[in-house]
Amino acid sequence: RLSKIGWIGLGAMGRPMALNLFTKTHLAHQRGEWAGYGKEKPSFLICEEDDSRAESFLFDLREKGGAGLVNRVERVGSGKEMAMHASRILTMLPSTPQVEAVYLDPKGGILAGLQALPLDTPSLGDLPASTSPVKPVSGVEELSSSTNMSAPYMPPTSSPPLDSPTSFAPASSDPNPSSGADAPHTLLIDQTTLDPTTARDIASQIHATTSHRALMLDAPVSGGTGAAERGELTIMFGSPSSEATRMAVELLGRMARDGGVIDCGSNGAGVGVKVCNNLILAINQIALSEGLALGRSLGLDPVLLHNVVNTSSGQSWSSRVNSPLEEIPGSPGSRHYAGGFQTRLMLKDAGLALSAAAVCNLPIPMTWAAKSVYEAVCNEGEGEMATRDFSVVFEWLKKKQAE
Ligand code: NAD
């Protein structure tokens, strides 16, 4: 169990992230550059409810890491089974209901698996108390040329307020520093974008039920499928303790850009930061689409407008990287909005921001407006736009104009 890493959810993001994590872990161990897994070679478990996705993951893993690596991977059918056989588990699921089910389902959930473990389950405590939280691994460029292996994490620069029901206190002290039989035996990292309060509640339940022998972090990501493929994500995490942080950054650094693993505070803080980021993105992408659609209606050259915006005050990640214009090479518009960040997921994230703001009694009118636009895009026709990149809102505006 100590030598096993598990991954649940091999979708658009989970697939490339797990590919990087598995191949880099395998290589690092082969070169003797990574300790912390007992004497065994690291091996891997996957859990994905869609058979075709699980199969295509194994195919891609063979291409990337060779048969030697694929032979070290087994597929399991539930979070419970995963928790009984793996000491480190990462999850990348659609949203709140799936995370609740995978972690807390009384029959098949991770918590049920943790409760079935014997009392003398070996601990993860053999990790060295490293001065550098991420150990650089050299030479892995052979597998992934653009990936940086050493991704030092950034500590939080300030503490969130402690007096609001939605605040996330910094992980200033360890609730249960590891020692002997009480040391943690399981590390859980959820990378889904979900409701921050639910993320915190699930972690509390896991910690309380296992007496902190399982430690859980929320560690959502930013960067999209391209950054996930390249291992250049930004990962923002909330952690219960410095011990959990030390163990997690070693894994997260294998999927992130240099300096891209960022400590945001205690449980729920990582996903809180992510929800705020996506609120801004949700609005920016619609603002860009409206500007470009108006430019087109005024008869302006779209490429010229694109270039001027990107050297002017209207620029954003959306305008630079995620243009809906088909004339811009590599943009979602140039590939008919296939892949990328699905509109239905952006609709979900706008809803998460609105729920979080409602708890604080904060009015966020632009987010309301953005959510209603994404809702309309998802409901258009037979719902064919819902699974396209959210920049498809530009096409929806054109369609509405023509109607
Ligand atoms: P996805 O729908 O492509 O992948 C989710 C996967 O989880 C699917 O393969 C699904 O079959 C699997 N799954 C669901 N329930 C399961 C269960 N009980 N057991 C096993 N597998 C299960 O979604 P995605 O695009 O990979 O996004 C995942 C998360 O990352 C979301 O929260 C999303 O908001 C966030 N995110 C996505 C992007 C992006 O560009 N796609 C970028 C940043 C963050």
Image (spheres, rainbow, N blue to C red):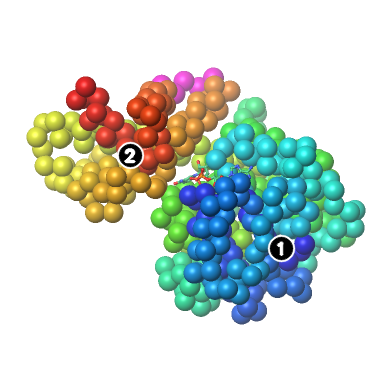
Of 278 and 390, the residue lying toward us: 390
Q: Is residue 7 left or right of residue 175?
A: left
Amino acid type for the residue under numbered disc 2:
Ser
Q: What range is drawn magenta here?
A: 361-366
Q: Return the x and y of residue 297 as percentages of the image width and height.
A: 14, 31
The residue tagged 2 is 391
Q: Earlier in the sequence, mark 1 or mark 2?
A: 1
Amino acid type for the residue under numbered disc 1:
Lys
- The image quadrant of residue 204 is top right
Residue at coordinates 60% horizontally, 71% vertically from top-left?
69
Which numbered marker is on residue 188?
A: none
Quadrant where the C terminus lies? top left
Q: Return the x and y of residue 106 as percentages of the image width and height.
A: 78, 37
- The image quadrant of residue 336 is top left
Q: Mark 1 falls on what kind of element?
A: strand
Furthest residue toward left? 299
Q: Return the x and y of residue 245 as percentages of the image width and height.
A: 66, 54
Q: Is residue 268 visible?
A: yes
Which numbered marker is on residue 4?
A: 1
Magenta stretch containing residue 367, yes or no?
Answer: no
Q: Is residue 315 above or below residue 33?
A: above
Q: Is residue 361 left or right of residue 205?
A: left
Q: Return the x and y of residue 362 as percentages of the image width and height.
A: 50, 22
Quadrant where the N terminus lies? bottom right
Q: Is residue 290 above or below residue 90?
A: above
Magenta part mainly helix, strand or loop? loop
Residue at coordinates 60% horizontally, 35% vertically from top-left?
96
